Image (tube, rainbow, N blue to C red):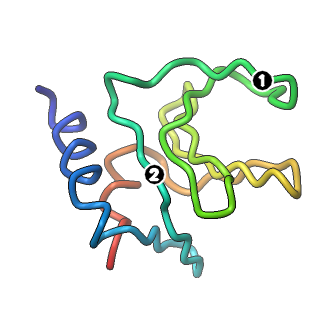
Amino acid sequence: MTDTRLAIARAVNHLGVRRIYRGDGRSIVIASLVREEDWRPLHAPWWRGKEVCVIGADLEGNFFLRHCDGSVRYWEHRLQTDTVLTRSVDEFIRSIDY
């Protein structure tokens, strides 16, 4: 198991207590995370960017996306925009706090 896969699995297992993404002055409560082996390319009519996989969601139904460039982005449905949160999945996982 890779270090990233192990870190994601650990984050999924601890989601009940460590579930807040903190970064760039934002705090986002995570509702769910997807294990790496279950990531699949997103096919949705509203997504017009490069290939991404949904790796999680917040309490409002917005998505955490793993972009093909390796970054993790936050898709806000209401605004129809994505914002880069971190440069990597590892960095995203390290940003999850209590």
Q: Rounded to the nearest whole Å, what is the CA distance between mark 1 and mark 2?
A: 19 Å
Determine whether 89 is above or below 78 in the image. above
Q: Name the residue under label 1.
A: 44
Position in image of residue 86 (x %, y %):
50, 54
Position in image of residue 15 (x %, y %):
31, 61
Position in image of residue 67 (x %, y %):
57, 32
> For this view, does 38 lie left or right of residue 23?
left
- Residue at image point 37% right, 65% down: 95
- Residue at image point 30% right, 66% down: 16
Mark 1 crowdedness (10 Å alpha carbons): few <14, some 14-19, many ≥20: few
> For this view, does 58 lie left or right of residue 95?
right
Q: What residue type is labelled 1?
A: Ala
Q: Quadrant of the C terminus?
A: bottom left
Q: What residue type is labelled 2?
A: Ser
Position in image of residue 84 (x %, y %):
63, 52
Q: Name the residue under label 2.
A: 32
Q: What element carries label 2?
A: strand
